[in-house]
Image (tube, rainbow, N blue to C red):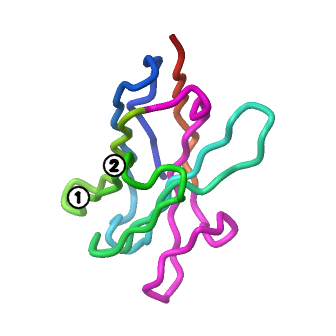
Amino acid sequence: HLVESGGGLVQPGDSLKLSCAASGRPLANYKMGWFRRAPGKERAFVSAISRSGGSTTYADSVKGRFTTSRDNVKNTVYLQMNSLKPEETAVYYCAADTGAYATVSKNGDDYEYWGQGTQVTVSS
């Protein structure tokens, strides 16, 4: 069970930190990803992090501005978003990948468990 939080309304250029808390199972068992769905658009990959947190990958559009991290003791994954843009208004989802390989995936179809999403609105 994954629950996202931290969304809200911010102005362009602002920062926001999303959290994804897991219950029921140790988050350390999963590779984790963040995705977003903007109004009228398909779901898009944002970032992913390995089980240990030692490996991360990002969509080109967020590189240098977004940072994903995890605290396996707290069973939580984070997405720090800086310099937000209006076009990044979307529902943000965290997802868990149980695959055996260490490589993190950018493909949402590889993720078995999803949270309900949290709305991020970037507007002046």
The amino acid pointed to by label 1 is Asp
Q: Residue at x 38, y 48 (%)?
A: 66
Q: Residue at x 65, y 63 (%)?
A: 108
**Extreme residue in the top direction:** 124
- Residue 65 location in percent, x, y? 38, 46
Q: Residue at x 65, y 52 (%)?
A: 44
Q: Is residue 88 magenta?
A: yes
Most foreground residue, 10 or 20:
10
Q: Is residue 9 above or below residue 108?
A: above
Please tell me the numbered disc located at residue 118. Answer: none
- What secondary structure is marked by label 2? strand
Q: In the image, 28: left or right of 35?
A: left
Q: In the image, 110: left or right of 31?
A: right
- Residue 3 location in percent, x, y? 45, 43
**Extreme residue in the bottom direction:** 101
Q: Quadrant of residue 51?
A: bottom left
The amino acid pointed to by label 2 is Tyr
Give the extent of the magenta segment.
84-113
- Residue 12 location in percent, x, y? 46, 22
Residue wearing tag 2? 78
Q: Is residue 73 magenta?
A: no
Q: Residue at x 24, y 63 (%)?
A: 72
Residue wearing tag 1? 71
Q: Marks 1 and 2: in contact by CB < 8 Å?
A: yes
- Mark 1 closeness class: few <14, some 14–19, many ≥20 residues within 10 Å: some
Mark with earlier residue (2, 1): 1
**Extreme residue in the left direction:** 73
- Mark 2 closeness class: few <14, some 14–19, many ≥20 residues within 10 Å: many
